[in-house]
Every structure is written in C-alpha cells, then in structure tokens.
Image: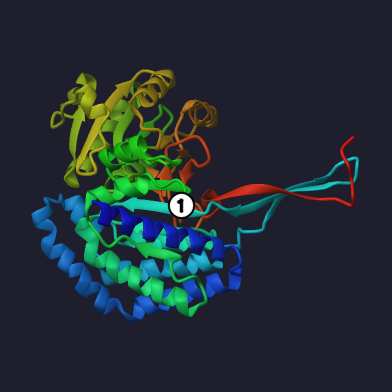
Amino acid sequence: MDDLRNDCEQVARQAARAAAELTRVTGQKKQKWLRTSAAALRDQAGRLAAANQKDLDAAPGFGLTDAQVDRLRLTPQRVQSIAAALEEVALLPEPIGEVISSSVRPNGLLVEKVRVPLGVVFFIYESRPNVTADAAALCVKAGNAVILRGGKEAMHSNAALADVLGRCAVAAGLPEHAVQLVATTDREAVGHFLRMPEYITVTIPRGGEGLIRRVSEEARMPVIKHFAGNCHVYLDQWADPDWAERLVLNAKCQRMGVCNAAESLVVHSAVAESLLPRVAEALLKNGVELRGDERARALVPDAKPATDADYAAEYLGPILSVKVVDSLDEAVEHINRYSSQHTEAIVTRDIHAAREFVTRIDSSAVLVNASTRFNDGGEFGLGAEIGISTDKFHARGPCGINELTTYKYVVYGEGQLRE
C-alpha cells in the first residue's frame, strides 16, 4: 500500500512541476504538439488497432454491455476523428493570457482580469479511448498538466494513445510529464490521488454514476461532475410532424450509448393521437422498446407500462420512456422532476412556447427544434470536450478549453498609494 501511494505521489509531483513549466510554454509549441500528435496517430493506426483489439478480446471478461463495447472500439474512422479533433483544438485561439476584461480606475490603476491555467487536472474516465486524446489536448492547450486514469477495459488502447502523445510532447518542447497515464488499474490508486490536493487542482470524473459519486465523496479538491444524461424531447402541440419524427429518431437512435441521447419522450395530448403512433412506429422499426403511461399505451399497444424508475432512467440503450401531458406547464414539471439537468429539447412552431420552455427548463443545454445529440463541445464550436458538466459552479455543459482555466487580476500602477 505504501509503495502504491508513493508511486501515485511521484506522478502527482511530476504533474505539478510540469504545470509550473507549462506557464512558460508558448501557444506555438502547443499547436506544434497537437499537429504532430495528429499525424503520428494516423501513421500508427495499425499499432493502435492492435492494442485496441486486445481490449476488445478482453471485453467479455469484464461483462461489458454492447453500448460499452461500442464506446471501446477504435475503428479507422474513429482514429481519424481523434486526429482531426486534435487539429481542431490546435486551431482554437490561445486561451492563456487572454484579457477577459480591463478598466482604468480614477486613480490611474489599470486593472485586468487575465485567463490563467487551473494547474493539474486529474481526469478519471471509463471505456472510451478517444477521451485519452481529447482530455490531453484540451488540458494542455489550456496550460494544465493532466493525469489520466482510464478504465481497465481500455488499458491497452489508452497506453498506446498516451505513448504517442507523450513522445510528441517532448519532441515539441513541452514538459516531459505534461501528460501522464496512470499505469496501474488498482482502484486504490484513485483514492490516493483524490487525497493529494497539494498537487492536484481539480478532479474530473467521466463515467458511470457510481464512479462520479465515489469521486465526489472522496476528493479533497474541487470536482467537476458529469452525472447521468436522462435527456428529454418534448413534442409541443404546435410541433411540426416531420421534424418531430426525424428529431426524435436522431436523438434516440443516432448513437444510443452516449450521454446526450434521448431517454424520454414527452408528448402534448393535443397531438398525441396523430403524432405519437407515427413516431413510435419509426422507433419500433429501429428496435427501440417503448415504456409509457396509460395514455401512451392506449395509442401504442406495443408499449410496456412505465414506472417512476423508467422516467428517471438513463438507459444508454434501445429503451425510451413516453409520457403524454396536457400542457406545457405539465411537460416542464415532468422534465424538471426526472431530468438529470443534462440536455432537453422542444419541437414546436410556436416561438412563445419555445421561449417559455428554454426559460423554465433547468438543464445544461436546452434546444429548440434540434436533436439532443448536439450538446457536444465539437458541435458547439468548442473543439473537443472533456465532458458535459451538470454542475452549476465554474463549468456547465460541454467543458472545452475555457472551462479548464481560471483567472487572476493583474494590476498596473505608477506608484499609487492607497489613502
């Protein structure tokens, strides 16, 4: 146990030193690192595929669901997407040193609010190897050192990705330990890191609710949390029928095992009879099981009865809960009751209903006539994201570069004294 703690402390110390060195690294060097890393990932796609295959072969032993295996898989297209994401981050404006605001006081003092790095980010995540590259890119672009702790199910894939990123970092002139991957899969290592606030500035867990709750309870430093994605689509009484069918199908079926996929459908009773059977038929053809209230089941005989647990569930698979309501007020009440404050959408032609919905829904992103799948850093123009925060303090929604920074006040004077 002492050896494990010492190993973890060494990694944390190295990260803290790297974070201090990164304050002097130019934006040009960070851009060079991101571009050379993207090129190296493309060149080593075969090596990455071989490492990923080891993880896929071991997946049955970990009891992974189909959705988890899908998140784990590194196809050639996904490797290309990872590389492209690094290049997109390289193109983003350099955040460090940005003057957020400035003013000149009556006594002549120039007061500037300047963007600076957080320091050291401890990032814990499950299943998705692409997150290794996304997290490293965003953290370092924002001037932070990052300690990456991926899940055991992606151990080989993460190690191969981190090795490429680390080698390219040194070649580009970045600190050797700016990006570190925790080598052990021992769960106790996480606990050790969470008790090191003297080295680690913030912890970001990205994974199942159990992981996030554990981190939130044990961490001695701030935590940026990403809880469940129980996302809703509300079909208002003024919903366009074609939009309704297409948007619900995309929100649920485009990729089911992700946090911004729709998990619940709410339908206004004025259009339920004409619209719900049509939407339900499209969902059923795509293999989605529906679980609804009595009114929904009367219109969709294939639907199963829904419970409170169904309305609160993040399925991450081919199940969707359905609720029929009599008003916008009832829809808002239902969504705010069961929502995880992640992503909600309304389909309507009525601008007043849209404004009411976006004002009263308490989630990190609210969309009007668009799929919930758009709540994503890349889709919002942030580049890659480190996660979608359901917190309200410091960061909310997709966490891009700016959410991985803080600020300090810099004051310039000419000998002024306070009287």
Secondary structure of the residue carrying tag 1 is: loop
Residue designated by label 1: 199
**95 or 397, which lies in front?**
95
Can I make out residue 240 in this image?
Answer: yes
Q: Quadrant of residue 107?
A: top right
Residue type at the position of mark 1: Tyr
**405 or 21, which lies in front?**
21
Answer left or right for 342 relative to 143. left
Answer left or right for 332 relative to 280. right
Can I make out residue 231 in this image?
Answer: no
Q: Quadrant of residue 282?
A: top left
**398 or 121, which lies in front?**
121
* As drawn, 122 above or below 39: above
* As drawn, 337 above or below 351: above
Question: Picture coordinates of residue 9 (x, y %)?
Answer: 37, 55
What crowding class fits label 1: few (fewer than 14 Cα within 10 Å), some (14-19), or many (20 or more)?
many
